[in-house]
Image (cartoon, helix red, strand yellow):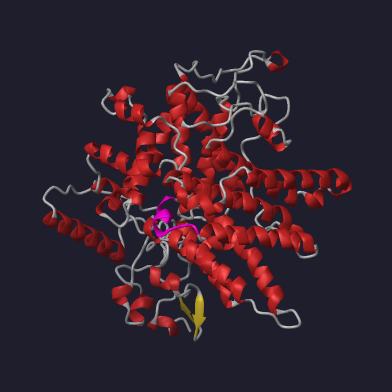
């Protein structure tokens, strides 16, 4: 009987884990029994018995850490050939450093073929635990995990180094950025920024900010030749952030850069990364006390801080204005995108504490340059506004201040609506808050330039007012949406707000889309959801009614999203979702 198995090897022991060839591992042939004979990988090289028996000897490969597989050798050869082609095409091209082979890297058919820029490595799911809050007019963002910007994937780790642009390119990139600075909330003095470019490197703005500005300039240059440097500047901005955090004199640069990076990631649908940078900007503003008119001298509880994070007094009104504008930039980003992502805010405004916001409303940079500062009365800026006393205070009517107020109303409406089910025991107080906020939103809208007059304003002001009007009406939708299904009054108010947003869209020209804030996407989605609910109600009611007018409004929103989506991929995804509403999917 012992001689029966001489036709094939009959090993008496099992191979060590990981010693079988790749083909046998893949086909799960180890320790399988067939015809009373062990059909296991015997580990023989260059080809095991099972592969030879199956006439697959050429495909027998081992990944045991002692050498490279045939597939790995072929891939490296392809890489070398591609580099050689680039050298022949461009005499100035320098091959990247040789990457050492890592014998411990795990082999699999999928992992070995995935690149560093694979969509699977880009997580777009919001980290918020409140994604599926009932009654949200925006719907769930969970499906964004399947979406990414095609311009951000497939980039090799060497590509940025290969296309490093000359340093002399920055002045040009800065001029490209300037027309969009209001769109991104940039708060530094432009003349001083230009002058700093001729100073020694140590006296210039930190590279983290300059790279972030260049990143946006490249994005705005798509699909032009400058767009090829986008990934380079993104990499450089992220790499220089650590160094910037070591220099306390560059804190404004870090906050500004964090805001720009957050906006970049949000606009491209990379929500987790955007949240990270927005939270970093918010934390730094609080750490350095930018939310306060003046730092509190008294130590709470007698504690001495380990490190006193305190900026030196501003040298003049321009520097003070830059600090004020920087805080409100981070605040506005936090308030708007916390609603869009349904997550808690990061900049808090607590009553009678060091976390209360007492910094004055933002003014124009021209006013800071001419020393026309508003009265520096020590008030809780946001709380005074939300308590209905804002109209009696000095200032707060610049376009930037109106934007801050609109984002405050949006977040306040979202929070009050989402907290409703948790505070039913205090229903009387909750109803009073609801009615008070509703009155403030209505009153705020009356202070704005009427929509019909938007076309007569200067472009920068028009672009800002489009966003301000939209945010304010979106606040009404968030406030009323939870009750719209059961309460006819709330339904009517919600629908009117959505229609008002459509009216604003009708005043947006093709040229305007290039200068609009991507936060409009979530606001338009809220309006589309409200109109979609009305479309469903009409189409299921009796007697039959026509939903043509509502469908036209939804179509206009879809068109606006598609137009803005050519610049910001996030809105391309949302436009597809609105198209599904129209199709009844």
Q: Quadrant of the C terminus?
A: bottom right
Q: What stretch is highlighted in magenta?
A: 507-515
Task: Examine the rendered structure and indicate whether residue 580 appears above or below residue 494.
Answer: below
Q: How many numbered marks, from 0 up?
A: 0
Question: Does residue 197 show up magenta in the picture?
Answer: no
- Confirm whether residue 31 shows in the render: yes
Q: Give the prevailing secondary structure in the magenta stretch.
A: helix
**540 lies left or right of 118:** right
Q: Tell which of 389 and 72 is nearer to you.
A: 389
Task: Examine the rendered structure and indicate whether residue 218 appears above or below residue 582.
Answer: above
Q: Tell which of 583 and 50 is nearer to you.
A: 583
Task: Examine the rendered structure and indicate whether residue 474 appears above or below residue 170.
Answer: below
For the point 35% across and 50% down, which residue is it? 220
For the point 55% across and 30% down, which residue is it? 285
Q: Where is residue 429 in the image (x, y as percent from the top left)?
A: 85, 43
Q: Tell which of 92 and 449 is nearer to you.
A: 449
Q: Where is residue 461 in the image (x, y as percent from the top left)?
A: 47, 44
**189 lies left or right of 200:** right
- Confirm whether residue 234 shows in the render: no
Q: Where is residue 389 in the image (x, y as percent from the top left)?
A: 71, 33
For the point 60% across and 76% down, which residue is it? 548
Q: Position of residue 305 (x, y in %)?
A: 61, 17
**504 lies left or right of 536:** left
């Amino acid at each position: 009987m012992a001689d029966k198995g001489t036709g094939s090897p009959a090993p008496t022991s099992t191979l060590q884990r990981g010693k079988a060839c790749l083909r046998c591992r893949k086909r799960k042939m180890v320790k399988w029994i067939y015809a009373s004979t062990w059909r296991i990988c015997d580990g023989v090289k260059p080809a095991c018995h099972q592969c030879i028996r199956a006439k697959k000897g050429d495909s027998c490969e081992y990944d045991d850490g002692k050498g490279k597989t045939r597939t790995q050798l072929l891939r490296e050869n392809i890489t070398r050939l591609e580099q050689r082609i680039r050298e022949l095409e461009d005499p100035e091209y320098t091959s990247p450093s040789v990457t050492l082979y890592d014998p411990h890297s795990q082999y699999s058919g999928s992992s070995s073929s995935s690149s560093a820029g694979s969509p699977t490595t880009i997580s777009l799911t919001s980290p918020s635990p409140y994604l599926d809050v009932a009654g949200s007019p925006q719907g769930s963002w969970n499906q964004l995990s399947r979406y990414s910007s095609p311009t951000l994937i497939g980039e090799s780790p060497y590509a940025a180094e290969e296309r490093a642009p000359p340093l002399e390119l920055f002045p040009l990139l800065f001029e490209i950025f300037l027309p969009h600075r209001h769109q991104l909330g940039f708060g530094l003095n432009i003349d001083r920024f230009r002058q700093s470019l001729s100073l020694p490197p140590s006296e210039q703005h930190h590279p983290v900010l300059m790279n972030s500005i260049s990143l946006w300039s490249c994005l705005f240059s798509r699909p032009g030749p400058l767009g090829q440097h986008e990934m380079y500047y993104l990499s450089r901005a992220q790499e220089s952030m650590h160094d910037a955090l070591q220099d306390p004199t560059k804190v404004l640069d870090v906050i500004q850069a964090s805001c720009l990076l957050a906006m970049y990631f949000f606009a491209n649908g990379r929500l987790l990364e955007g949240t990270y940078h927005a939270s970093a900007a918010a934390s730094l503003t609080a750490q350095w006390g930018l939310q306060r008119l003046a730092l509190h001298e008294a130590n709470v509880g007698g504690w001495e801080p380990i490190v006193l994070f305190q900026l030196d007094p501003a040298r003049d009104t321009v520097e003070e204005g830059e600090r004020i504008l920087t805080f409100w930039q981070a605040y506005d980003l936090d308030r708007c995108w916390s609603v869009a992502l349904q997550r808690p805010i990061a900049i808090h405004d607590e009553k009678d504490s060091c976390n209360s916001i007492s910094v004055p409303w933002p003014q124009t940079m021209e006013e800071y340059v001419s020393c026309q500062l508003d009265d520096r009365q020590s008030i809780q800026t946001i709380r005074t506004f939300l308590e209905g006393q804002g109209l009696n205070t000095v200032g707060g009517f610049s376009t930037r201040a109106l934007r801050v107020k609109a984002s405050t109303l949006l977040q306040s409406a979202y929070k009050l609506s989402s907290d409703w089910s948790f505070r039913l025991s205090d229903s009387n107080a909750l109803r009073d808050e609801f009615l008070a906020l509703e009155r403030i939103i209505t009153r705020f809208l009356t202070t704005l330039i009427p929509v019909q007059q938007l076309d007569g304003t200067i472009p920068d002001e028009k672009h800002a007012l489009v966003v301000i009007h939209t945010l304010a009406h979106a606040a009404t939708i968030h406030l009323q949406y939870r009750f719209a299904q059961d309460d006819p009054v709330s339904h009517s108010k919600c629908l009117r707000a959505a229609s008002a947003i459509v009216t604003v869209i009708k005043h947006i020209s093709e040229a305007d889309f290039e200068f609009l804030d991507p936060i409009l996407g979530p606001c338009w989605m809220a309006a589309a959801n409200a109109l979609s609910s009305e479309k469903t109600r009409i189409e299921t009611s009796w007697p039959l009614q026509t939903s043509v007018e509502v469908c036209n409004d939804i179509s206009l929103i879809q068109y606006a999203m598609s137009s803005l989506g050519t610049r910001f991929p996030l809105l391309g995804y949302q436009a597809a979702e609105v198209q599904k509403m129209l199709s009844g999917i």
